[in-house]
Amino acid sequence: MYNKESLKATEFISDEEIRETLKYADENKDNLALVSEIIEKAKLRKGLSHREASVLLACDDKEKVKEMYALAEQIKKDFYGNRIVMFAPLYLSNYCVNGCLYCPYHLKNKSIPRKKLTQEEIKKEVIALQDMGHKRLAIESGEDPVNNPIEYILESIKTIYSIKHKNGAIRRVNVNIAATTVENYKKLKDVGIGTYILFQETYDKKEYEYLHPTGPKHNYDYHTEAMDRAMEGGIDDVGIGVLFGLDKYRYEFAGLLMHAEHLEAVHGVGPHTISVPRVKPANDIDPNDFDNSLSAEMFCKIAALIRIAVPYTGMIISTRETPEVREKIIRLGVSQISGGSRTSVGGYAEEERPHETEQFDVSDNRTLDEVVNWLMTAGYIPSFCTACYRQGRTGDRFMSLCKSGQIQNCCHPNALMTLKEYLIDYASPETRKIGEELIDREIDNIGKPELRPKVREELLKIEKGTRDLYF
């Protein structure tokens, strides 16, 4: 039985409800009066149900799809402006005891070298990331209670936060590790993590168990209920996502939105972020083994409809995607992207990009400076801001500010100030020139006119050497 307020995975992600939703969507995809009604509801910026959004996904009327895209762009601007938050993944270890069929880290893969970073190696990686200009990391690790116990993760987070190199500092560490216990989530909270991120991979329980034949990740319920345990452990911000291409995308889309509805209903706060990765080539993995791949066009439509259905959430796209796909999908709703990423264990400290321990092929190989330059040329503000986390604007407090639009009064100025830091400390001359001109223009777009002279004062302080200023 479907119950979004239940704490049982098979009740808040109900297979029967998803299948009924897809049937309803098929029956109504050409009902343009209903489609128009749903779009009008979406314009209220209060979101859509999984069933309503699924009707829009099924609808392929060209004019209505254009309306959806235009609305997604506008909602993205309303909630997140033209800011794009920058981050980088940091892979700590590829030791893993699971048998996931789509991941090269699976236990039976004997062709990939196994590696785990020491704390000294982590320091070298972090310094390399700081020298690029990064302030926000997402740490990744395989699931292995012997090689990667929670104590190793906690020690690694403390190491990352402790490193100050020149003007560099990592100010927010998000964590993407396997589902764990309430006690361990409390420990992660205590060492100051930002967002806890865990991809569902697929919401179809039967398909999930097939794709995860061995290891602790085989337990669908334990994995799917992880966010509830994380929130019980005091973690305010959680990030969800599916791996598109593993199972039928319409099923995943509905399940993803149901998960967001569940978190909102039970905890009063939905997902801080939703990620939209796709299956990509990797060591021992061929995406053609999965017959549910989706086109770039449908991928972009899914992103647009997530933005419409869950307007407050941050949306993440990684370097799995090409620059061309990233350019289109950013416009339709994405608010966070990685830049200069390496998906290997120990990849940043090396001059040449190592491939032997990569989790997946990187399709956007540009440097962080090149990505920042590209974003600014397209009219976006690359933001290295972490102020909300450090000011306690997390969880329901962040969501209330975001939903009301008040968050813009902090985020826009903070984005400009962190961009100024980046331009002075790390940017190439060409990128700095473009960035300085962008900042000059964007000061006049700060919503509260009384803030503008204050921001100019702070920018002057940054010019003179002060760092880490924020509202």
Image (cartoon, rainbow, N blue to C red):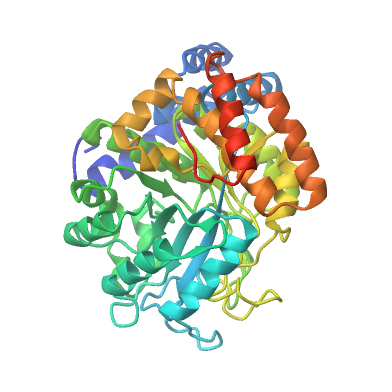
Of residues 301 and 408, the one nearer the viewer is 408
Q: Residue at image x 77%, y 46%?
A: 431
Position of residue 86 relative to residue 447, above or below, is: below
Which residue, as the protein is rendered here, is positioned at the far right?
430
Q: Residue at image x 56%, y 32%?
A: 458
Which residue, as the protein is rendered here, is positioned at the far front?
464
Q: Is residue 115 left or right of residue 279?
A: left
Of residues 13 and 388, the one nearer the viewer is 388
Residue 348 location (% of width, % of height): 60, 71
Residue 33 location (% of width, % of height): 55, 11
Residue 368 location (% of width, % of height): 68, 55
Position of residue 202 relative to residue 101, above or below, is: above
Can residue 322 be seen in this snapshot? no
Of residues 222 and 459, the one nearer the viewer is 459
Position of residue 65 relative to residue 138, above or below, is: above
Quarter residue 349 falls in:
bottom right
Q: Residue at image x 24%, y 46%?
A: 231
Residue 141 location (% of width, % of height): 42, 69
Can residue 314 be seen in this snapshot? yes
Q: Residue at image x 22%, y 47%?
A: 234
Position of residue 270 relative to residue 77, above or below, is: below
Q: Quadrant of the C terminus?
A: top left
Q: Quadrant of the N terminus?
A: top left
Task: Count all numbered tags in the image, as a single digit.
Answer: 0
